[in-house]
Amino acid sequence: MVFNSIVWDFNPEIFHIGSHGVRWYGLMIALALFAGYLIFKRYLRGDKLTPEMVDSLLVYCAIAGIVGARLGHCFFYEPAYFLKHPLEILKIWKGGLASHGWAIGLLFALWLYTRKYKIPFLWLMDRIVIVVALACVFIRLGNFFNSEIYGRPTNLPWGVEFVRDRLYDRTTGALLPTVPRHPTQFYEALSYLVIFIASFLFYRKRNMEVRDGFIFSLTMIALFSARFLIEFLKNDQVAFEAGMKLNMGQLLSLPFIIAGIGLIIWTKSKPRYFSREQIPEHK
């Protein structure tokens, strides 16, 4: 049997509590935090991070991630609207999160965390970036359930028709027919899964032989390079991206890629290794 395309007509809401719907996207975020917490606590925390410190780390990541993602969407993609209607920023249930804002918020929160517990920043980032890659897998699956952030039309057999996000004809108001599109959410999810597995295996095998910051830098370069390349297949997310050679997602990815390359070069002059870092005991 040959498939011309896949028709995706999935309800993004799991169930309702009163007038509020519980969505698959929210469940994916919860699963991302839960899976990351379990893996970090079991395999990545080392002997010096207490369970209580890991619990605190989860709170930092959850709050900073959501706040950063919301602010990133508001000010990277729709600044004019949200500057005019600032209270709308709080209405997160209406949707609108940006992964680059999530990354910035997370970096800031982890910097605060390492200052509080007197932990070397790069030591922590080499570990946390691994579960961040896994979290990206769940988030992109959530986008797929939401029928959002998909790609341009395609004739490939795995093209997906997102019938719940049909467009209207501006003249007649009639619904336009759907066409198969690149399921870029899956392209990203698969890329991030490969990056997670590779970075996790590398950490488990070679964590005593690489400089602090190396795994963080390499994984960050891989994550945002994958995002940069897949963006070429995506639809524009906002109107002002029309006609741009590089869209907003690509422009925001470039600083992370450049920072990762710069960090690898910089840490080469700082010969600190995992086995030599001393983390203070916390009681």
Image: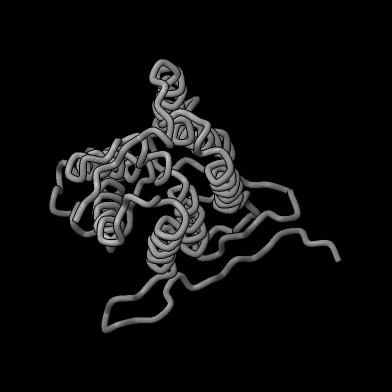
Q: Quadrant of residue 179?
A: bottom right
- Residue 71, x across and y down, in percent: 24, 45
**Which image quarter is the C terminus in?**
bottom left
Task: Answer left or right for 42 relative to 79.
Answer: right
Between residue 117 and residue 158, name the one nearer to us: 117
Task: Answer left or right for 42 relative to 85.
Answer: right
Between residue 193 and residue 187, name the one nearer to us: 193
Q: Is residue 243 visible?
A: no
How is the rendered protein coloured? one colour
- Residue 6, x across and y down, in percent: 68, 63
Q: Quadrant of residue 274?
A: top left
**Which image quarter is the N terminus in?**
bottom right
Between residue 217 and residue 254, name the one nearer to us: 217
Residue drawn at (45%, 70%), measured in percent from left and top?
A: 12
Above or below, 6 relative to 264 = below
Between residue 45 and residue 98, name the one nearer to us: 45
Residue drawn at (35%, 42%), measured in percent from left and top?
A: 124
Residue drawn at (34%, 75%), measured in percent from left and top?
A: 21
Q: Is residue 258 visible?
A: yes
